[in-house]
Image (tube, helix red, strand yellow):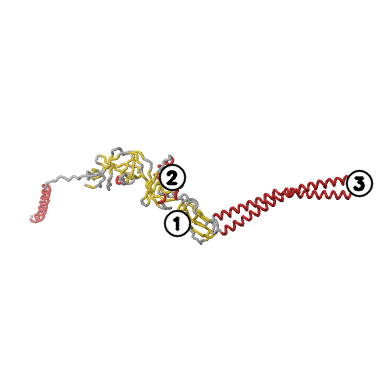
Amino acid sequence: MRKFFRIALPLLILLAGVGGTVMLVKSTPQRPPLSEEEKVWVVAVEEVYPASLAPDLSLFGRVDAPRLARLSAALSADVVAVDVLEGEWAEAGQRLVALDARDARLVLAERSSEVEELEAELEHERQRHQSERRALRHELELLALVRKAAKRAEDLVKSNVGSLSSYDIARQEETRQALAVNRRELAVAEYDSRRRQLEARLARARARTEQARVDLDRTVVRAPFTGRISEVLVSPGDRVRPGDRLIDLYDAGMLEIRAQIPTPRIAVIRDSLERGLELEARARVDDRPVAARLDRLTSRVARGAGGTDALFRVMVGASLLSLDQSVELTLRLPAVSASVALPYEALYGLDRIYVLDDSRMRSVLVERLGDLRATDGSRRVIVRSGEIEAGARVIVTQLPNASDGLKVQVAPAREGGAGAST
């Protein structure tokens, strides 16, 4: 019995402790579980009404000049004067560079003397031809007389009155005179060929003389049009050869701005050009306005480029621009119907906005059309979607956890405020 109590007593104590613990747990009052409340985000909204809006497209361009003259030397000579400096303006016909003209004058004098010599030779040939023709007439008259004498001598011989030796002498004179007439006729006939040869030589000499005169004129390099000097590459005392560049000049009245149009906007731009619409662009340089107009698209796209280059003709403010200058352009695109202008905060990513639908956020896919500068100077983004109805309330607050169905409430203080969790 004693052994039994030593074993059973600890078990009884253990069971009594477990039973007491269970009774204490069951007797503890039960509290109802706490319910988890859904977060509500405070947002700002704007009521939108689709309308016809003209978006702006921001571009970065470079000033270019379709009329850029790279004036070079036409002959070997020394530079004696440079009348302009880089950045200066030059009028059409104004002297820019003067080259040493002494060699050119000597060549012109030599060519002119060749012309005079050939003109004199040609005149001598004409006079000689006239003399040959007169001589030919006399030779023919003399031949007729000699033939009559030979005929008389022949008749005397036949009548046994004249001697045979006299007849032979008359025939010899007739033959010699016939040869003289043939030589005169040949000299007269050769005149045309000799004349054409001399005239050809004279034409070449006159051409060389005109070339020498042109070279002499080219010793003075003048501005081909009114423009601005972009680079001066020579100084007085330099020796230049044919083809060496002297001065670069561009026509500031025909400046263009070359800018790349993104590929998604190419179709709109090309359609506008085909319809004859004038697309205006604006910029500011030195806080002064510059106005340009889209003129054409380039016919070649560079490999790896993200769009097509467009050329804008500068209409106002050309004097403010310099060649190769970078300019930020704002291009006004044609108006697009059923579009809305929203703050940039309303746009998530590139093509998504959220509208308020029964205190819940609902995503809407949109097409981004461009930017718009509001009357207060702020910039907005223009989008379009068939799901945006008139009076729709678009959420214009950026939320880090924006998603479909997220519960929000409109900020009571003002529209456009920053979101905060409650």
Determine the residue located farthest toward the top in the rendered image.
Answer: 390
Query: In the rendered view, would you say 396 is above or below 238?
Result: above
Question: Quick one: label 1, few (<14), some, or many (20+) residues within 10 Å?
Answer: some
Q: Nearer the viewer, residue 319 or 74?
A: 319
Pointer 2: what residue? Answer: 295
Drawn side of residue 405 relative to residue 59, left or right: left
Kind of residue sitting beneath label 3: Val
Tell me the CA gap for discs 3 and 1.
108 Å
Mark 1, residue position: 86
297 left or right of 135 in image: left
Indicate the secondary structure of the residue bearing disc 1: loop
Could you say whether the residue bearing mark 2 is in a helix, strand or loop? strand
Mark 3 lies on a secondary structure that is loop
Provide residue 395's location: percent of width, then percent of height.
27, 43
| Left or right for 297, reference 189 | left
The image shows residue 210 at horizontal and vertical percentages of 59, 52
Proximity of marks 3 and 1: CB atoms separated by less than 8 Å: no
- Which badge, 3 or 1, comes first in the chain's sequence? 1
Q: Amino acid at mark 1?
A: Glu
Residue nearest the observer in this picture, 307 or 370: 370
* Residue 90 image offset from top left, x and y in percent: 46, 53
Which of label 2 and label 1 is nearer to you? 1
Q: Nearer the viewer, residue 344 or 153?
A: 153
